[in-house]
Amino acid sequence: MASENQKKANPNIPANIVMSGIRPTGMVHLGNYFGAIRNYVKMQDDFECFFMIADLHSLTTHPDTSLLKSNVRRVLAENIACGLNPDKATFYCQSHVYETGELYLYLNMLAYKGELEKTVTFKDKARQHPENINAGLLTYPVLQTADIIMHRATHVPVGKDQEQHLEMARNFVVRFNHRYGEIFPEPHAFNYNQNLIKVPGLDGSGKMSKSENNMSTLYFADDDDTIRKKVMKAKTDSGPTEMNSTKPDYIENIFLLMKLVSAEDVIQHYESAFNNCTIRYGDMKKQLAEDMIQFVAPIRQKATDLLENDAYLLEVMGKGAQKARESAKKTMKLVREAMGLNYF
Ligand code: TRP
């Protein structure tokens, strides 16, 4: 593993620090949970972890900050409700770590315009919002690198869509280390060697995501009836006519969702019913909806309780900021020394 090599190359580099960022631009949904949060919850016990709400990154596409405060609180509450434990991991807000701005500035001098312009996420966002192609959008991967290396993290639990950003982070790290001395380990995507679970949307195409259509995504904030309504609307057909046939994608998706929340015997029952052509998708969806509700309701309740306890959320944010800044201050001291910016 790269982190092992790094450890051998430089004993001053700490091993196995996990860092990831969560964009506060939407409500937490099942795709977030099974694709990311569930892994974070496991990592808290195995590694030193930094989980950050990327509020500054959201300014690159959402310059209006009027909803930011409540979005940040919701993301905080929903992630804690899903099992993220602020006593185990450092859970903090990006904008509270002022050192990030400084490291971002230094890294910007090592990032080339050409490589930034080639970034797929930049090109996508520039295409979507031609009226707001700001420099923050262009340097988004530089800010993300600052987040990661601020804690000298090695393991970054992210999905495929972030792989290019991580590759850029490694390039910036290599350049920094080459120019100023070995300060930073190279960060890599990390998900317990598992393929990430893709949670399919309910409309039979694509995955659950906040930017897609709301009816196909199940949010932890959805009430029981909304969950029932969304699940019952999922696309099906009149059922297979031949024994043991292959499932069409939209049916496979319903089975996939069931595997996330239903008991093994329930899944087996519908697998056999599909294979011997007796399946009734209406019944299956009713069952799925109820199992989904069983899964979502306690988390939703916990998030609601947390959102009503503003003092607690503020305390979590305050403690997280303090822990994150302690780590950041240590790193920035090393950085300024390495760069020769220590004039006193
Ligand atoms: N860019 C990430 C996303 O879109 C969010 C993010 C910000 C992040 N800073 C990070 C992810 C640092 C991992 C590490 O989801």
Image (spheres, rainbow, N blue to C red):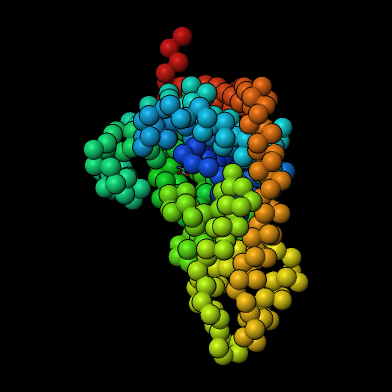
Q: Residue at x 23, y 38 (%)?
A: 131
| Residue at the extreme left | 131
Q: Is residue 214 above or below residue 49?
A: below
Q: Which quadrant holds residue 343?
A: top left
The spot of residue 183 in percent (x, y) is: 51, 33
Q: Residue at x 67, y 81 (%)?
A: 273
Q: Residue at x 49, y 55 (%)?
A: 215
Q: Nearer the viewer, residue 125 or 281?
A: 281
Q: Nearer the viewer, residue 313 or 195?
A: 313
User: In this image, 147 relative to 132: left or right?
Assistant: right
| Residue at the extreme top | 344
User: In this image, 75 relative to 262: left or right?
Assistant: left
Q: Is residue 247 above or below residue 244?
A: above
Q: Is residue 199 above or below residue 312?
A: below
User: In this image, 213 relative to 81: left or right?
Assistant: left
Q: Residue at x 68, y 59 (%)?
A: 290
Q: Is residue 269 visible?
A: yes
The spot of residue 242 in percent (x, y) is: 56, 90
Q: Is residue 173 visible?
A: no
The spot of residue 186 in percent (x, y) is: 50, 43
The spot of residue 170 in percent (x, y) is: 44, 44
Q: Which quadrant holds residue 304?
A: top right
